Image (tube, rainbow, N blue to C red):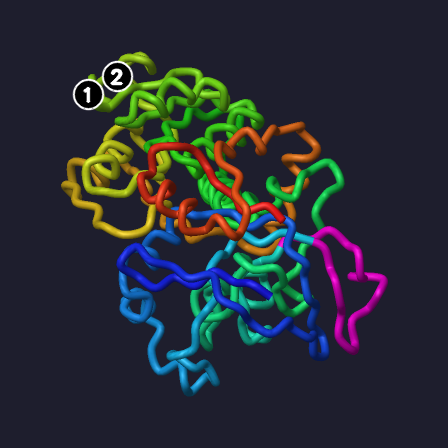
């Protein structure tokens, strides 16, 4: 089978791998869609081994992982079960089922794993597309415990979005405990930010979207953003205060990263406001007393989502008719991977996906 391997320095290779065979408790997924995520660019642009070490993954050999072996990228997988191994209950998963893949594996026994937060496994999570083969391939082998049924109302591309980007947005909204009583400012209107806006709007939340890209700002209203703010033209915090009668929003999400949008996310909230930090990398630099303590604000770190939340996100989308497919502006074939990531690296468009 074919699989995309990131080489760093903006290079990748479409390599040949043996077709996987499922072991006990495993399934092989025939890929139908594999989303391209902004975090892929860390491995596309930089030495993948260095990125892995910077994320705290060390001594992988002790876990039976060969650090020198090529790893297939992609952590937004969705497809159809092509084969199952021994011990798989056909009443739960069977050949032909449409499934999304929760892209983390853990020990299955610690409290984090048992509650669906496998990425926080006490013994170290294995992340597909990072240190285990991911979804940018014809097939993918995973434990059936990482599978989530894809609702019939959703496309495979939509399921791929939920497998990371859109699911991450949903996870942040859950962490904020948001409801229709709230107002939400979303900083960064890329795929995750637009997903947050789209889902929050479906929950009845008034959404203010902020970005410094005029193109993204103009597109935001299609995703339920009530007020779209171009942060390159106006002071985003002042604009949000004006829109909220001087009070600020009750909740904010940073999906942009960088010091400025994170500061703005904090300072755009009213007293007792809640801020979820989603974007990877960078720091938050604020005045502890003026910006946090004196305003009784709460800053929340939101690391993707639980496996249960992934299922809930998919069913929320299906039940509320959320058009998650609208996120995708680019559809590619696997053999177009070099061109796909070259364009995706510019981060000028919407979400991209490989379709099979």
| Relative height, residue 309 to residue 109 (above, below) | above
Above or below for 36 versus 307: above
How packed mark 1 is, by other alpha carbons closer than 10 Å (few <14, some 14-19, many 20 or more), is few
Residue indicated by mark 2: 239
Q: Main secondary structure of the magenta part?
A: loop
Q: Nearer the viewer, residue 102 or 278?
A: 102
Q: Is residue 267 left or right of residue 152?
A: left
Left or right: residue 41 versus residue 91 is: left
Name the secondary structure under disc 2: helix
Where does the image place residue 350, in percent across and percent down from the top left?
43, 33
Q: Secondary structure at mark 1?
A: loop
**Residue depicted at x 49% and y 36%:** 330
Instruction: Give the residue displayed 26% in from the left and 59% down from the top.
Output: 9
User: Dot 2 surroundings within 10 Å: few (below 14), some, or many (20 or more)?
Assistant: some
CB-based contact (under 8 Å), mark 2 and mark 1: yes
Q: Which mark is residue 235?
A: 1
First to last magenta residue range: 80-100
Picture quadrant of residue 84: bottom right
Q: Is residue 30 above or below residue 245?
A: below
Q: Residue at x 52, y 57 (%)?
A: 136
């Amino acid at each position: 089978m074919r699989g995309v391997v990131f080489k760093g320095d903006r290079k990748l290779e479409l390599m040949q791998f043996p077709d996987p065979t499922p072991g006990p408790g495993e399934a092989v997924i025939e890929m139908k869609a594999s989303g391209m995520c902004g975090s892929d660019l860390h491995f596309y642009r930089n030495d993948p081994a260095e990125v892995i070490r910077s994320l705290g993954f060390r001594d992988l050999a002790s876990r039976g992982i060969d650090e020198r072996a090529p790893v297939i990228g992609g952590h937004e997988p969705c497809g159809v079960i092509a084969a199952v191994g021994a011990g798989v209950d056909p009443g739960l998963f069977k050949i032909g089922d449409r499934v999304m893949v929760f892209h983390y594996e853990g020990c299955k026994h610690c409290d984090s794993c048992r509650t669906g937060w496998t990425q926080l496994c006490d013994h170290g999570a294995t992340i597909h597309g990072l240190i285990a083969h991911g979804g940018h391939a014809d097939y993918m082998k995973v434990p059936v415990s990482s599978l989530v049924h894809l609702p019939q109302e959703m496309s495979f591309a939509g399921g791929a979005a939920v497998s990371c980007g859109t699911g991450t947005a949903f996870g942040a909204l859950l962490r904020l405990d948001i409801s229709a009583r709230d107002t939400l400012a979303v900083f960064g209107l890329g795929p995750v930010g637009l997903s947050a806006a789209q889902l929050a709007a479906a929950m009845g939340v008034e959404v203010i979207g902020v970005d410094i890209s005029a193109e993204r700002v103009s597109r935001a209203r299609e995703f339920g953003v009530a007020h779209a703010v171009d942060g390159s033209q106006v002071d985003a915090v002042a604009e949000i205060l004006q829109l909220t009668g001087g009070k600020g929003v009750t909740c904010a999400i940073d999906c942009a990263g960088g010091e400025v949008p994170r500061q703005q996310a904090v300072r755009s909230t009213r007293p007792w406001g809640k801020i979820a930090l989603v974007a990877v990398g960078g720091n938050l630099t604020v005045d502890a007393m003026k910006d946090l303590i004196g305003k009784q604000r709460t800053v929340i770190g939101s690391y993707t989502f639980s496996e249960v939340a992934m299922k809930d996100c998919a069913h929320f989308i299906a039940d509320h008719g959320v058009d998650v497919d609208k996120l995708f502006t680019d559809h590619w074939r696997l053999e177009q991977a070099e061109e796909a990531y070259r364009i995706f690296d510019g981060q000028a468009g919407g979400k991209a996906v490989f379709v099979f």
